[in-house]
Amino acid sequence: MKKNIFQISPSFYDVMPAEYRELVENGPFEKKVGVSDLGAFKELSEEHPLCAGCGLALSLRLILASLPNPEDTIIVGSTGCSAIAFPQVAVQNIHSLFGNQNAIASGVKRALTLRFPDKIKDVVVIAGDGATVDIGLDMVMQSWFRQERITTIMLDNEAYANTGGQESGMSQEGAVLHMAPKGKTFPKVSLPELARASGCVYVAAVNPAKPKKLEKAIVRGVLAARELGPTYIQVFTPCPTNYKFKPNETIEKIKMRVKEGTYETTEFISAEAQELFARLEEGKK
Amino acid sequence: MLSTEYRVLRGPEGYLPPAAASMGVVLPEKGSALVEGCIVPKEDAMELIADKLLSAKNPFFFPGPLVLWAWKDGVVEKAKAIKEMAEAAEAKIIPMPDYRPKYPMINPAIEINPNHPNLTIWHNKIDVCVFIGVHCHYANMALKIIRGGTECYTIALCGEAGHEDAMISLRDVRVEDLKRMTQIIMEKKGVGK
């Protein structure tokens, strides 16, 4: 897809809502922009209906700004908080049945490869922890075993947040939530380790308190999936509503968890991905 | 004139009105059109569209993505013809740029959404509307919602096979058809005879 198909018919230019005109004139399409340029271009999300201080909303904003090829990216979402933000996102996106996101993404990627063999089409799954590690773990891991060339991004708020607060596999051991009053009885699942063991060529755990690191992980994850095989990026997105902290404390909560070692930021780069990134870096010079 | 028992009439028909196709309304053959569920000659339907637009208190055109975006050859010309037709009918235009549901809400003063078109109809007090350039499955859904919940009279100018769920629907609408309707409107207004 090229930007020229995003042109407005001149006769209707005056009636188009301002956000569409801005996207055409100053959107990120076919531009090399990133999180450092936020505020200087029209973002891919106009607004969102998520709670104040939502770590997921902040992360989604950064992820969208980091996509290397938004005009040719297809996002596959799933049930959860992020699903109510996606209708506002100006990137092709598909909502799948709860947990089916990686199966859908596999099919989309294969179909696009057949339909547009000479074009780059990035397929990116963005789903919550419940969809990724609980309900959809089968589909997620099978897509990794099959070496599907898709990027899987988990928005990890450590709970089923928009259904009242149930524990998920990503909740910490002992976590007490509205719908989990007795406290979680088993540890947080280490999906980055599972991803690595399941064949992901690039794995990272990042957070929005470090936007540049998050951006780097997204770019690497998308480029490695495009060329090599499955990639997995886990983004820590704390939930003030269910974990009962003030909306303006989200970033502080992230920093605190990282500091106390209860949320690890990691990066695994396979040898082939290392070679790819070195080649791409060399090409930039 | 062919007919079925079910008529596709101005609403509100009530929550979840049936799809007109399920009630026996069939799409017209080439050269024909649908008026309230009945198949009529295309020229008759064009005349009726002009009458409806000119007698409306607050007519609106709802152009969809297929004509709002200059995505292939010929679209710019078609968009220009639609604008001229709307201007001739003194109708306003509210676009449907894409099909995102845009929760929690859209701004009904400046755009229409196929998932809740009734909001735009109610907000702007629209009594006659024209759908054009909307992909068929979304047009059918929106037309049914409008028929179910509003008293707006719906007209669908379709580039494909037409819409059973509109009160008037033309099929295979090309630039020359739009120009013809503009001419009919101007003649009825007593302009350009």
Image (tube, grey):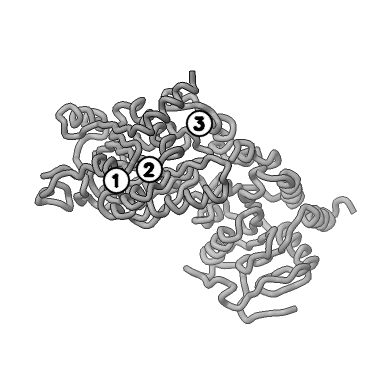
Q: Could you give the CA–CA distance between mark 2 and mark 1, rounded to whole angstroms?
A: 9 Å
Residue A148 in sight: yes
Which of the two residues, A138 or B177, is positioned nearer the viewer here? A138
Q: Chain of mark 3?
A: A
Q: Chain of mark 2?
A: A
- Kindly give the residue lying farthest to the top in the view shown: A285
| B124 left or right, relative to B48 | left
Residue B123 in sight: no
SS for callout 3: loop
Residue density around tag 1, few if under 14, some if 14–19, many if 20 or more, within 10 Å? some
Which of the two residues, A222 or A125, is positioned nearer the viewer here? A222
Disc 3 or 2, which lies upstream in sequence? 3
Q: Could you give the CA–CA distance between mark 3 and mark 2, rounded to whole angstroms?
A: 30 Å
Look at mark 3 in the image and give the residue it sits on.
Answer: A42
Look at mark 1 in the image and give the residue it sits on.
Answer: A198
**Image quarter (top left, top right, bottom left or bottom right) of the N terminus of chain A:** top right
| A228 left or right, relative to B94 | left
Q: Chain of mark 1?
A: A
User: What residue is shown at x 77% (from left), y 63% (from top)?
Assistant: B46
At label 1, the amino acid type is Ser
SS for callout 2: loop
Disc 3 or 1, which lies upstream in sequence? 3
